[in-house]
Image (tube, rainbow, N blue to C red):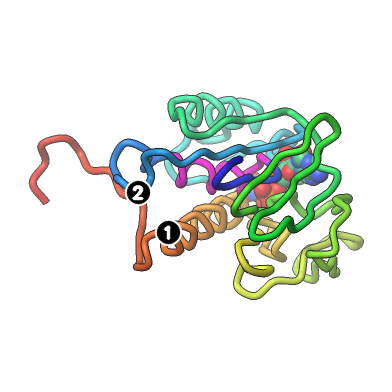
Amino acid sequence: MYDVIIIGGGAAGYGCALTLASVENTQEWAKNKKYLMIDNGKSDILNASFFNLAGVPFGIGGDELYKNMQTQLSNFKSCETKNDTVVKLEKNGENFTVTTENKTLEAEIVVIATGMHKFEIESTLTNTIIHNDVMKPGKIALENNNNKIGTNLYVAGLASGAKTMFAIANGEGAKVACEIFKLWTGKSAVAHDVIKDKKI
Ligand SMILES: Cc1cc2nc3c(=O)[nH]c(=O)nc-3n(C[C@H](O)[C@H](O)[C@H](O)COP(=O)(O)OP(=O)(O)OC[C@H]3O[C@@H](n4cnc5c(N)ncnc54)[C@H](O)[C@@H]3O)c2cc1C
């Protein structure tokens, strides 16, 4: 049983996973949380080179950026990653059942971050619509209200209908993570680390 399963490990999935996992050692309420990100390796990042991302080397290749994100996330023990394809998403009482090609998993909260190309997960919980903010036709999004699909079910990145920029997708992942923190703490919560011994 996971506290959060993130479906899709691209810009939005990593934004969510890194934000969730980054408080594992700093917040008492986050100490025993368990996260899982499931991805089948087709992120748009892998076809891009980036000249407009703040704070990363100018022109970084998407494959290098992707590897950096994988390494960064591996520093946190609370978040596992699985290379797999999710095929079904169902509600099971208060929780969710997430079925992949290889396993059946349970989670309290699910974040969908599957990009804009297609949504092939069987589910009565989601409604696929046309992504109307892209240059190429035939792209999709999931109906949502400010990244929320339903109770404990969120969507982030291009799957939410966001504009096709890395920073926007990544930021939506982080935003959803902060919404989850708020759910758990009952108040506004963010993931901020500070420079050791610096007085602020
Ligand atoms: C050629 C190209 C160049 C680009 N250049 C730039 C640029 O210069 N600057 C910029 O800001 N943006 C750029 N972008 C856009 C940027 O890459 C995207 O905005 C960003 O990757 C979207 O993030 P996302 O997480 O929504 O989707 P993605 O990064 O596409 O991630 C979605 C992930 O979900 C996974 N997935 C889907 N379905 C399932 C499933 N059922 N089970 C498991 N996993 C699943 C996919 O394999 C994928 O890894 C470019 C994109 C392309 C294609």
Q: Position of residue 107 (x, y in %)?
A: 63, 47
> Is disc 2's CB within 8 Å of ligand 1?
no
Does dot 2 land on a helix, a strand or a loop? helix
What residue does disc 2 label? 29
**Dot 1: element:** helix
Q: Main secondary structure of the magenta part?
A: helix
Question: Looking at the picture, how far across and down is residue 6, in whole percent?
Answer: 64, 46
Q: Quadrant of residue 23?
A: top left
Residue denoted by label 1? 184
User: Residue visible at 60% across and 52% down?
Assistant: 108
What residue is drawn where x is 67% and y is 62%?
A: 163
Could you tell me if the residues under marks 2 and 1 are in contact, i.e. CB atoms within 8 Å?
Answer: yes
User: Whole-percent x and y of residue 143?
Assistant: 76, 71
Q: Which residues are magenta?
A: 9-21
Residue 42 against residue 130 in the figure, above or below:
above
- Give the number of the disc on residue 150: none
Is residue 58 found left or right of 115 in the rendered image? left
Q: Quadrant of ligand 1?
A: top right
* Viewer-nearest residue: 155 or 61: 155
How far from the left and from the top, in percent, is residue 9?
A: 66, 40
Any magenta on residue 12?
Answer: yes
Mark 2 or mark 1, earlier in chain: 2
Q: Amino acid at mark 2?
A: Trp
Can you name the residue that lies furthest to the right here? 138
Q: Is residue 89 above or below residue 183?
A: above
* Image quadrant occupied by the N terminus: top right
Q: Does label 1 point to a residue whose CB lies under 8 Å from ligand 1?
A: no
